[in-house]
């Protein structure tokens, strides 16, 4: 069992890099064991791909969109089972009780896809980021947003980690580090920023080989707001109906993969009807191949928004022009592989380094939660023995 003068007998501090659901769950679980946690995130607030977007129209109207994960589920055999009940009792989540289906662009028909005994769909209340926000502000957790990590250095002689911000500010020393943002260790960080990844995994080559270049699938999303509920023109009988589902997958389209009515979720404003469209991976990859990985320009995002809306309108749906539309790119929306399916997280016991996220378990919210819990377990177990 490792012990050290730098760890024993002092207030233990762990840095969690990233405030998405994996990092937030990890930070919360560790803090409950009396260990001081500092969460760092370059974004303005918590959530990662469970964040909520706040937009303002030209006439000053405020609109909120869950522009990342639309919902999440918990399987009956999940290691995270019970968290949903805890969060629901705290008013952080609610079940999204709507019918879901699919739309075939060739047949121009909707099909219901609900199956008996399907897992409940949960959403954060009043936004998807509510869970991460609560977990990142609980006792024992200090959160620092708007702070990008530039360097994560292991000081061998002191047996401790040192963090430095992107602008060179010393962020402090920590006995342990949890990296819940794969870009901290990915070459993609270099492609976007022109800088080397903050965490040099040559320190832990076994971990480095597994996370160096995780294949990811990108997506574009488009946020739309309409004054009235959307409708559907049934060509066979020439009648107009309201779209029968509040969320539906889209088949036989090279542009659109998913659409849902964000304002139909519990706890949302119904002053307008807000929809979110998700592109196919194929469409996103085509755009990125032409424009690169750096932040897309307003012109590119405007074109994407127009093309996704046009595809929705060309499906035969009776879609009017929205009074608001805006696109967002998720450059690494879904990992295409699981690097720690058995262990649930990556762990370097000697240096007290854990790496967690959906890329460890499965490309969904539940996978990210399970991985964050596994990372927390590794660190709390180690620190309880020191």
Image (tube, rainbow, N blue to C red):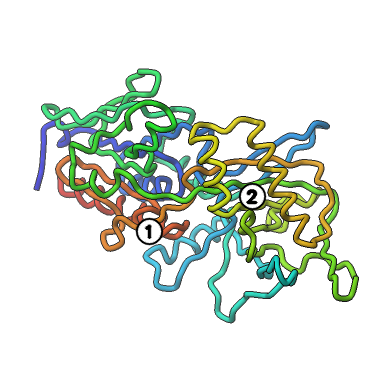
User: Can you give x and y, in whole percent of width and height, for residue 121 in the image?
Assistant: 58, 65
Q: Please give the label number shown on residue 362.
A: none
Residue at the far right in the pictured view? 238
Query: Which image quadrant for residue 107?
Result: bottom right
Please tell me which of labels 2 and 1 falls first in the chain: 2
Q: Is residue 136 left or right of residue 214?
A: right
- On screen, residue 270 above or below 107: above
- Asked whether 159 or 258 is in front, the reply is 258
Placement of 3 over or under 112, stated as above or below: above
Identified at 40% across, 60% down, the residue is 362
Q: Is the C terminus in the top left, top right, bottom left or bottom right quadrant?
A: top left
For label 1, the crowd category at 10 Å Cα-Cα, with few meaning under 14, some 14 to 19 and many 20 or more, is many
Residue shown at 11% from the left, 32% from the top: 5
In the displayed structure, does residue 33 sit left or right of residue 66?
left
SS at mark 1? helix
Q: Look at the numbered disc 2 and give the secondary structure of its residue.
A: loop
Estimate how packed mark 2 is, as few (under 14), some (14 to 19) or many (20 or more) residues with alpha carbons within 10 Å: some
Residue at image x 84%, y 59%?
Answer: 318
Q: Dot 2 corresponds to which residue?
A: 126
Residue at 46% in and 45% down = 332
Residue picked out by circle 1: 370
């Amino acid at each position: 069992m490792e012990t050290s003068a730098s760890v024993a007998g002092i207030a233990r501090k762990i840095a969690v890099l990233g405030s998405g659901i994996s990092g937030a769950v990890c930070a919360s679980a560790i803090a409950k064991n009396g260990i001081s946690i500092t969460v760092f995130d370059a974004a303005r607030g918590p959530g990662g791909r469970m964040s909520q977007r706040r937009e303002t129209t030209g006439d000053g109207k405020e609109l909120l969109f869950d522009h990342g994960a639309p919902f999440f589920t918990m399987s009956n055999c999940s290691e995270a089972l019970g968290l949903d009940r805890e969060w629901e009792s705290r008013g952080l989540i609610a079940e999204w009780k709507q019918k879901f289906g699919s739309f075939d662009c060739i047949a121009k028909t909707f099909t219901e896809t609900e199956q008996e005994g399907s897992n409940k769909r949960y959403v954060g209340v009043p936004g998807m980021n509510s869970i991460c926000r609560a977990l990142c502000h609980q006792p024992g957790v200090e959160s620092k947003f708007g702070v990008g990590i530039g360097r994560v250095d292991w000081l061998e002689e002191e047996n401790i980690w040192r963090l430095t911000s992107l602008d060179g500010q010393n962020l402090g020393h920590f006995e342990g580090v949890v990296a819940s943002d794969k870009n901290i260790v990915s070459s993609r960080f270099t492609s976007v920023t022109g800088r080397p990844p903050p965490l040099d995994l040559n320190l832990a080559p076994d971990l480095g080989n597994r996370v160096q270049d995780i294949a990811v699938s990108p997506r574009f999303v488009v946020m739309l707001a309409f004054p009235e509920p959307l409708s559907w023109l049934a060509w066979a009988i020439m009648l107009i109906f309201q779209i029968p589902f509040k969320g539906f997958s889209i088949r036989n389209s090279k542009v659109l993969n998913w659409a849902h009515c964000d304002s139909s979720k519990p706890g949302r404003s119904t002053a307008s009807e807000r929809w979110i469209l998700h592109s196919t991976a194929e469409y996103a990859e085509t755009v990125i191949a032409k424009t690169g990985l750096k932040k897309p320009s307003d012109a590119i995002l405007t074109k994407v928004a127009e093309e996704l809306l046009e595809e929705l309108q060309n499906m035969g749906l009776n879609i009017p022009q929205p009074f608001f539309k805006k696109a967002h790119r998720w450059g690494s929306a879904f990992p295409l592989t699981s690097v720690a399916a058995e262990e649930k997280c990556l762990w370097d016991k000697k240096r007290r380094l854990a790496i967690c996220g959906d890329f460890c378990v499965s490309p969904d919210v539940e996978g990210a939660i399970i991985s964050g819990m596994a990372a927390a377990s590794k660190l709390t177990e180690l620190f309880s023995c020191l």
